Image (tube, helix red, strand yellow):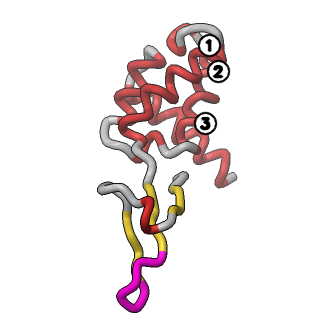
Amino acid sequence: MGAEVLEPARAAVDDVVLSWDGEDVLAVRLPQLSDSLDHILAAMERRHGMPLAALDRKAKQEVVRLLEARGAFSVRHGVETVAGALGVSRFTVYNYLNRENASKNA
């Protein structure tokens, strides 16, 4: 999901420090998707040159596919946030996700 490996000395309070035989060997900085989901959505709007709600169905499905690949739906209220940005219902977002997963398994 995009974690960053750091030297233990560079670890912040929220980072995970891993130890081996009592010695800190590395730190892992996990992404804060809940904080960055709005930034990801704004970047997608800039890329498309319009609000995501103004996109056609196919483009919205592509946005959902890209967001799923970035882990956006693993955060709390991710589906609701994306549905609001796309101007669709949560049910529609779930349908897009199910369609994508069905095509992967076919």
The residue wearing badge 2 is 59
- Could you say where residue 41 lies in the image, as x and y percent from the top left? 50, 24
Name which residue type carries label 2. Answer: Ala
The residue wearing badge 1 is 56
Please, what secondary structure does the residue beneath circle 3 have? helix
- Could you say where residue 70 lies in the image, as x and y percent from the top left? 55, 43
Q: Earlier in the sequence, mark 3 or mark 1?
A: 1
Circle 3 crowding by C-alpha within 10 Å: few under 14, some 14–19, many from 20: few
The magenta segment is 20-25
Circle 2 crowding by C-alpha within 10 Å: few under 14, some 14–19, many from 20: few
Circle 1 crowding by C-alpha within 10 Å: few under 14, some 14–19, many from 20: few
> On the image, which quarter does residue 81 sit in?
top left
The residue wearing badge 3 is 66
Q: CA distance from mark 3 to mark 1?
A: 16 Å
From the viewer's perspective, tell me whether residue 58 is left or right of residue 20: right
Q: CA distance from mark 2 to mark 1?
A: 5 Å
From the viewer's perspective, tell me whether residue 39 is left or right of residue 101: left
Q: Where 44 falls versus 29 (above or below)?
A: above
**Of 82 and 5, the residue lying toward us:** 5
- Could you say where residue 47 lies in the image, as x and y percent from the top left? 65, 18
Residue contact at pointers 2 and 1, CB within 8 angstroms: yes
- Could you say where residue 8 lies in the image, as x and y percent from the top left? 44, 68
Q: Residue at x 44, y 19 (%)?
A: 85
Q: Where 76 falls versus 46 (above or below)?
A: below
> On the image, which quarter does residue 48 sit in?
top right
> In front of the other: label 3 or label 2?
3
Q: Residue at x 41, y 75 (%)?
A: 18
**Of 20 and 84, the residue lying toward us:** 20
From the viewer's perspective, tell me whether residue 43 is left or right of residue 30: right
Q: Residue at x 57, y 16 (%)?
A: 45
